[in-house]
Image (cartoon, rainbow, N blue to C red):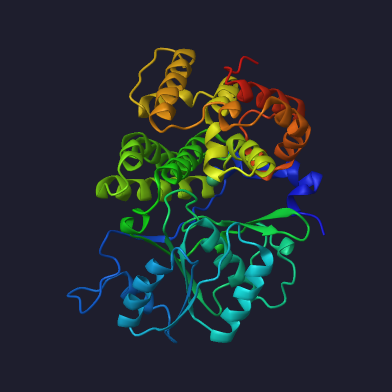
Amino acid sequence: MDYWFSIPAVRGAIPVAGSTFVKGLMSTFNTASVFVGSNIFPEGKQLLPGPVTWIATRCPRKKAFLVTDQFAEQFAIKVEKSLQGAGFATQIWNRVLPEAPLENIKDLAEAMKGFEPDLIVPVGGGSVIDSAKAAWIFYERPDVKDLLMVTPFFPLALRKKAILAAVPTTAGTASETTSAAVVTDEKNHRKIPLMNPELTPDFALLNPEFTWSMPPHLTMGCGLDVLAHALDALFCAGTSDFSDAMGVKSLELVFKWLPRAFANGQDREARHRMLIASCLAGMAFSNSSTALTHSLGHALGAAFKLHHGVAVGLFVPYALQFYHPATDKISLAARVMDLGGSSKDECLIKVIGELRKFYQTLNAAWAIKDLGISRSDFEKNLDRIAKDAFEDPSGFFTPRPASQAELKKLLNYAYEGRDVDF
Ligand SMILES: [Fe+2]
């Protein structure tokens, strides 16, 4: 069975169907209902109803199934107590694996079927929330035997059995508010990107304290993922006034608060703001798109087993330089970054210069060679990386179309850290 996006006609039609121009004729904006704060899972009696009380009104059977992994289980236990306080019977499944492998998700779906919840609560990073979304499909739709059947075009008919409330413990993927999930088909050595508006969680519950334990390198990687989401959402061909508003605010927050969260993981306000920045960027790209940062980052990351955020973040400056001839949005980015600039070319120079300083503050790689990848290893994999990037659906919405040869050239520039001049 083929991916829906590997069909040539679909590949050609999608950027047109999702373009800003067509969105002017008709568009939707999907998002979870968001609660944010360090007191969203209180223990004991409360004067006023909290988020869990509101969620409970949607769940007549009051059966909550919490999905987590060994690390985030400590936070799932806190969420569980709050749910029990609102009258839920609960069960925790703590066996999610990194990268959301399909076989693990099938085990999760079986456990879900055994408990029959009307509320699914993933508590964890992107892999946990994505695993819960995929298992939710199997739980609601036993007729779906292969996740490749899931496309963005047709209703999935979820929510006949359960709704989903996501609790992130990292500030990066924003799966708590996006219509996407990525799972790994280990047998066939491939990732399955799932996209459907119904996969947007019903609730996103953002407790900044759950992100305190992220070490600095993870804070940096996840933060660069937020930056890539916000910028691609602003620049891509599927942008809208809604996604622009959220992308702009997210960008502003990332530049102000990521260095503080990186320097001190216990910085309460920085963690709070970064969780909001991540959620806003997720809303923005989920309703517009990502673009070359993600198609190139996915391909490089898969070849060299890099953290998603580190890989996509690395391509931010090169993608912006490549987009530049096809868009005026760089002036908007320069304004958000408070840089000024009298022409769009001057704005680009200022934005790239500021990004370079920002990456140095975060100890983040500016070039592929800075990741410890040798030139010979890079060249051995280069053709495959360029091909994978070209086929990746994230790149369909690039504001400036890129051929496979141009992507290869872009990868070479990014290896050396050279400014893009073509
Ligand atoms: Fe991402």
Quadrant in the rendering for residue 20: top right
Nearer-the-camera pick, 105 or 284: 105
Q: Position of residue 137 (x, y in %)?
A: 62, 70
- The structure residue drawn at horizontal position 61% and vertical position 20%, both measured from the top left corner, is 416
The answer to whether residue 233 shows anywhere in this view is: yes
- The structure residue drawn at horizontal position 34% and vertical position 82%, both measured from the top left corner, is 84
- The structure residue drawn at horizontal position 60% and vertical position 82%, both measured from the top left corner, is 113
Look at the image and tell me in which quarter the N terminus lies.
bottom right
Q: Is residue 192 left or right of residue 369?
A: right
Q: Is residue 380 left or right of residue 363?
A: right
Nearer-the-camera pick, 91 or 391: 91
The answer to whether residue 140 shows anywhere in this view is: no
Quadrant in the rendering for residue 79: bottom left
Q: Position of residue 415 (x, y in %)?
A: 63, 25
Q: How many marks?
A: 0
Ligand 1 shows up in which quadrant of the image?
top right
Q: Is residue 97 left or right of residue 14?
A: left
Is 421 rendered above or below residue 146? above
Quadrant in the rendering for residue 301: top right
Q: Position of residue 153 (x, y in %)?
A: 67, 57
Is 170 rendered above or below residue 217? below
Nearer-the-camera pick, 197 or 68: 68
Look at the image and tell me in which quarter the C terminus lies.
top right
Q: Position of residue 114 (x, y in %)?
A: 58, 86
